[in-house]
Amino acid sequence: METHTTGDSANPGRARATLLVVDDEPANLGVLNAVLQPHFRVRVARSGADALRAANSEPRPDLILLDVMMPGMDGYAVLARLRETESGRDVPVIFVTAMDSSEDEQRGLESGAADYITKPINPAIVLARVRAQLEARQTRDMLKKFNLQLEHQVEEGTHALEQAQLQLMQSEKMASIGQLAAGVAHEINNPIGFVGSNLGTLAGYLEDIFSIVAAYETAATAAGNEAAFDEVRSLRQKLDYDYLKEDIAQLLGESKDGLARVRKIVQDLKGFSHVSDTVWEWADIHEGIDSTLNMVWNELKYHCTVKKDYGPLPKIHCLPSQLNQVIMNLLVNAGHAIEGKGEITIATECHGDTAVRVSISDTGTGIAPAALAKVFDPFFTTKPVGKGTGLGLSLAWNIVQRHGGKIEVTSEVGKGTTFTLTLPVEPSQAEAADAMPA
């Protein structure tokens, strides 16, 4: 059985906390009600079962004063049942009981009670402890609300930062593609040019072959006319039929190779342009290096030789297109650092059982010690105005960090520079999750 009691409020416009008082003795209920009712909205229940029903019905209690010794279901059982429900999980419970030993109080607090009051009650103590628990709950609720708001703001901020980084990466990528566009066009035009020339030559060859075939057909109609076959043999020798047969095969082979080169360049360009790709996958880092090298080759081939020193590597779990961006930035920077003729060395090796290492070295001008400490800062560049954005190495650092790796640089003025990437074979789940947009 449950009853509701209300009383006058000194501040009618202020919201009144709702208390649920649970006791099987009417006299105890009367005493607590007399103390609490002038200050709070009071609901009462006379059994454990009634208390559980009241806790799950409106108006829901902000605090429960619960007797321990009750028939049927004691206070400990009621509290345990309350903590199993969504509505009662966070409601503070104060035990009110005649059990006054320190062991009883310890058991009550360990079972999840917020406070423990012994009978006979002192009205001032009851009011003070009730108010303290209500204020504590209000503070917890406010903190919970603020934490949720803060989490939401952090999520929004993280998402905004992720989008900004992706846009920055996209801008840098587009700048890189613009810079490389002329070189890519040149790389494509070369094979297209000789394929076109080969096809023109092939058309002439076929015309000659068809002439020879037509002559054979004419001779065949004049069976027994040896003079007709002499004319065919003369035409075959004049048009160098044996050379035509051999050269046609070479022309077709060169043309196929040229078309394969064009297809490879286009595939590399398509793969390279997927900047915003956020799909983690197992990738062969050597394939990514070779693909990226093919993209920037026109930037390097006239003044650099490239040496590859690849060691055996496992596939790594990564964002391949983003790592390709890092490799491209390092290769282009290496090419720009070389004045005249020089060499770029790309070396790979395993770093223990859980990581791989990629180093890109050049024989360029090197970086001064004062600048070396700032090479990963956004917008810092040692290149002439208009030749660099100052974002390439900063983005490279961010991408490597997102993969749970590190990027290091050593340099000696006049001798060259080495950038070393260390990447985990499989980043932790937390690192991979941080790399995903919110």
Image: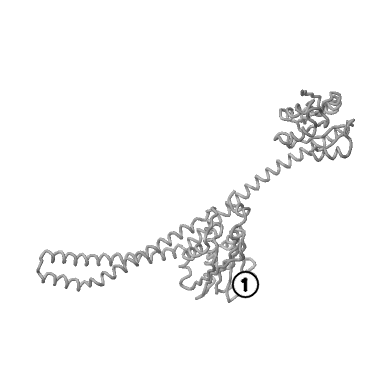
Asked if residue 116 can be seen in this view, the reply is yes
Residue 174, relative to residue 233: is it above or below? Answer: above
Asked if residue 44 can be seen in this view, the reply is no
Residue 342, relative to residue 101: is it above or below? Answer: below
Residue 43, relative to residue 94: is it above or below? Answer: above
* In-front residue for pair 14/145: 145
x and y percentages locating residue 13 in the rendered image: 76, 29
* In-front residue for pair 151/422: 422
Q: Secondary structure at mark 1?
A: loop
Q: Quadrant of residue 396?
A: bottom right
x and y percentages locating residue 295 in the rendered image: 47, 64
x and y percentages locating residue 213 in the rendered image: 19, 65
- The residue sitting at 53% across, 67% down in the picture is 331
Q: Residues within 10 Å of mark 1 (few under 14, many from 20)?
A: few
Amino acid type for the residue under numbered disc 1: Ala
- The answer to whether residue 433 is left or right of residue 78 is left
Q: Quadrant of the N terminus?
A: top right
- The residue sitting at 51% across, 60% down in the picture is 175
x and y percentages locating residue 419 in the rendered image: 58, 68
* In-front residue for pair 263/162: 263
- The residue sitting at 29% across, 70% down in the picture is 247
Q: Quadrant of residue 25?
A: top right
* Callout count: 1
Provide the residue designation for mark 1.
368
* In-front residue for pair 76/272: 76
Q: Quadrant of residue 19?
A: top right
- The answer to whether residue 104 is left or right of residue 215 is right
How was this image coloured? one colour
